[in-house]
Image: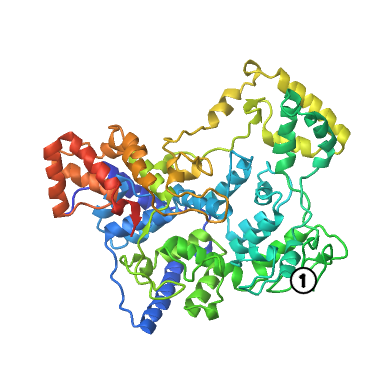
């Protein structure tokens, strides 16, 4: 018999209804649910045709509990709260899966999960190189559902002030300052699924890219540098000469040198570059100047005889609109893997033309679909989440198709570090999406300490410094700034000093906050790092490989401190009002695994409670959280 809904479940039901009725983002005509369902049906028809061609049976559709957990983890990166799980499992509505998908995609959790994806893809760091404004720009772009083509254009063509929200995307280049060729190689891999890193040093023996091609491509971004830093060069040399770089003047100067000039980007790309001194092929000599030229797609070129300032803009335009099916296909395949667990073609960073893939019609269709949706990654994922293909039961067997998926049910995979962490936070503290996004820390730091709080911020400082037109103006400004810093003290801070201080949040390793709001990358002693979160050194460097340290962490770390042994954890609040041992066990299962226990499992757990008393419930929590079912996505 269907249980009556709890008050909490009714509250969730109301929120589901509100979200169905009101859009939380700017709706476009193509976001219409009927259009999305039509596109989902088209995807399913291509999959059905593939089944027929391979003589594969149609898989069973998964049960509600598996769908619930899968939909949450895939779209918002965490398990449902007990209240959300109860509502979905107990309500009897044939359209509830569609309603759940819309509820999830309109939640803050969606942008949080997408931020984790983007941070991994773009190797985003903060707190160890002053890239926090860049991180904040990406986080905000994901929250605002910025279309992928616009996002790409900002990253590749932006110039100017790294602290200005309009140009903070310059962090894409300043992140790789001193390694411009690596940046070019990463750009091709991320946005076009082309691996060209080998061509930095030699012709690619496994592909068609020649070293000459790579340097002509690199010419589009060549000539970039800090904006206006030369005006401070002499002063900087004076202040840091003869081991004086730790004196107060040098520490104040470092703020301007590193956190203003060092985070800016000048030079739009000259369109020409010299071949390196070790160039070894007959199509050029070391020191020859070559002009920018794209290696495939519609030709875009710049003269090697004179510099022009718009190389990066031309490169962005070529990537987005002049590479045929390549740009849309690569991001469509990345999103397919994000939702379905495996790319239509693999590896996802090695583009395969539709005609040469195992599924020409499907690859061609999803590439066209993402263009038709205006590169709206949320709408594209909405389509995939509405498909029967997404709902198919788990398939533990490997794909029968080499270099791709057989779409015969979702493959089992361990959760990412971020998914495990965010799920544990959900159990420990309830819905983590009720917490605010981490604000951008705009305070000025000198020798690690904030100064002029409430009087001047980094964006204000950066704007003023970058507006200076000469070395003389820089020297005068520095003298004034130095005096302001020396005369500053907590007692002299402005009236809004305390407000600004309180807006900045510092998180320790047990902070119950979303992974997307924690420092990037995670410290080496943090749960996230131990479970394979990327160190942000290379593109998509996260790992799901197991190790002994993970087991020890589950047995002795955050899980034990904040879940098993902490009676105030949100998880235990679900037991309030439960009058029987059986009901308490049932609620723990739903909270942790999003399903009720089987008859056999219930018998085991009741035996544990009878044997251990209240400690038995803690043992159940420990066992379930460390189970393969909790740690893996089905």
Identify the secondary structure beneath mark 1.
Answer: loop
Q: Residue furthest top?
A: 491
Percent position (x, y) of residue 12? 33, 47
Q: Quadrant of residue 393?
A: bottom left
Percent position (x, y) of residue 508? 46, 33
Asked whether residue 32 is in view, the answer is no
- Structural crowding at the residue carrying mark 1, measured as other residues with C-alpha within 10 Å and reported as few (<14), some (14–19) or many (≥20): few
The front one of 549 and 236 is 549
Residue at 60%, 39% in the rendered image = 128
Q: Badge 1 is on which residue?
A: 281
Q: Quadrant of residue 633?
A: bottom left
Residue at 39%, 65% in the rendered image = 386
Q: From the viewer's perspective, is residue 453 above or below residue 271?
A: above
Percent position (x, y) of residue 86? 26, 49
Residue at 80%, 39% in the rendered image = 467
The front one of 40 and 57 is 57
Of the 4 image quadrants, the one containing the C terminus is bottom left
């Amino acid at each position: 018999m269907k249980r009556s809904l709890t008050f909490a479940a009714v509250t969730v039901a109301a929120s589901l209804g509100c979200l169905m009725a009101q859009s939380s983002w700017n709706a476009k005509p193509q976001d219409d649910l009927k259009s999305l369902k039509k596109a989902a049906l088209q995807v399913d028809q291509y999959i059905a045709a593939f089944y027929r061609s391979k003589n594969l049976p149609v898989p069973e559709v998964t049960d509600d509990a598996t769908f619930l957990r899968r939909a949450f983890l895939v779209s918002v990166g965490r398990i449902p709260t007990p209240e959300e799980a109860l509502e979905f499992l107990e309500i009897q509505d044939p359209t509830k899966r569609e309603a759940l998908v819309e509820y999830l995609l309109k939640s803050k959790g969606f942008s949080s999960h997408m931020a984790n994806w983007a941070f991994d893809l773009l190797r985003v760091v903060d707190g160890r190189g002053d890239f926090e404004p860049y991180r904040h720009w990406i986080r905000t772009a994901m929250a605002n559902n910025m279309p992928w083509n616009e996002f790409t254009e900002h990253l590749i063509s932006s110039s100017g002030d790294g602290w200005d929200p309009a140009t903070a995307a310059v962090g894409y280049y300043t992140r790789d300052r001193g390694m411009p060729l690596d940046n070019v190689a990463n750009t091709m891999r991320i946005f076009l699924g082309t691996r060209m890193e080998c061509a930095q040093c030699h012709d690619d023996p496994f592909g068609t890219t020649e070293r000459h091609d790579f340097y002509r491509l690199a010419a589009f971004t060549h000539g970039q540098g800090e904006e206006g830093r030369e005006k401070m060069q002499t002063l900087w040399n004076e202040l840091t000469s003869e081991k004086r770089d730790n004196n107060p003047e040098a520490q104040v100067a470092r703020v301007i040198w590193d956190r203003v000039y060092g985070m800016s980007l000048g030079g739009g790309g000259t369109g020409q570059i010299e071949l390196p001194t070790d160039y070894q092929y007959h199509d050029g000599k070391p020191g020859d100047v070559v002009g920018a030229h794209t290696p495939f797609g519609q030709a875009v070129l710049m003269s090697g005889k004179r510099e022009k300032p718009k190389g990066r803009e031309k490169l962005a335009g070529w990537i987005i609109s002049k590479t045929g099916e390549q740009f849309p296909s690569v991001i469509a395949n990345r999103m397919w893997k994000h939702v379905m667990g495996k790319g239509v073609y693999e590896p996802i960073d090695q583009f395969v033309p539709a005609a040469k893939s195992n599924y020409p019609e499907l690859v061609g269709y999803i590439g066209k679909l993402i263009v038709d949706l205006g590169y709206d990654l949320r709408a594209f994922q909405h389509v995939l989440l509405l498909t029967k293909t997404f709902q198919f039961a788990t398939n533990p067997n490997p794909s029968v198709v080499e270099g791709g998926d057989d779409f015969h049910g979702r493959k089992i995979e361990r959760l990412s570090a971020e998914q495990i962490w965010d799920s544990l936070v959900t159990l420990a503290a309830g819905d983590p999406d009720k917490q605010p996004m981490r604000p951008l820390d705009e305070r000025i730091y000198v020798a690690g300490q904030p100064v002029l709080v409430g009087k001047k911020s980094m964006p204000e400082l950066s704007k003023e410094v970058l507006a200076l037109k000469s070395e003389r103006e820089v020297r005068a400004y520095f003298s004034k700034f130095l005096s302001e810093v020396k005369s500053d003290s907590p007692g002299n801070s402005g009236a809004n000093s305390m407000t600004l201080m309180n807006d900045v949040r510092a998180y320790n390793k047990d902070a119950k906050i979303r992974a997307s709001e924690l420092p990037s990358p995670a410290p080496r002693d943090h749960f996230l790092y131990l479970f394979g979160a990327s160190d942000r050194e290379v593109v998509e460097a996260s790992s799901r490989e197991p190790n002994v340290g993970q087991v020890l962490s589950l047995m002795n770390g955050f899980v034990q401190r904040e879940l098993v042994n902490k009676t105030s954890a949100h998880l235990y609040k679900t037991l309030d009002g439960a009058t029987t041992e059986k009901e308490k066990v049932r609620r723990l299962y739903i909270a942790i695994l999003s399903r009720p226990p089987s008859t056999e499992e219930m018998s085991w757990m009741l035996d544990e409670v009878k044997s251990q008393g209240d400690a038995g419930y803690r043992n159940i929590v420990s066992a379930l959280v460390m189970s393969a079912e909790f740690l893996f996505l089905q």
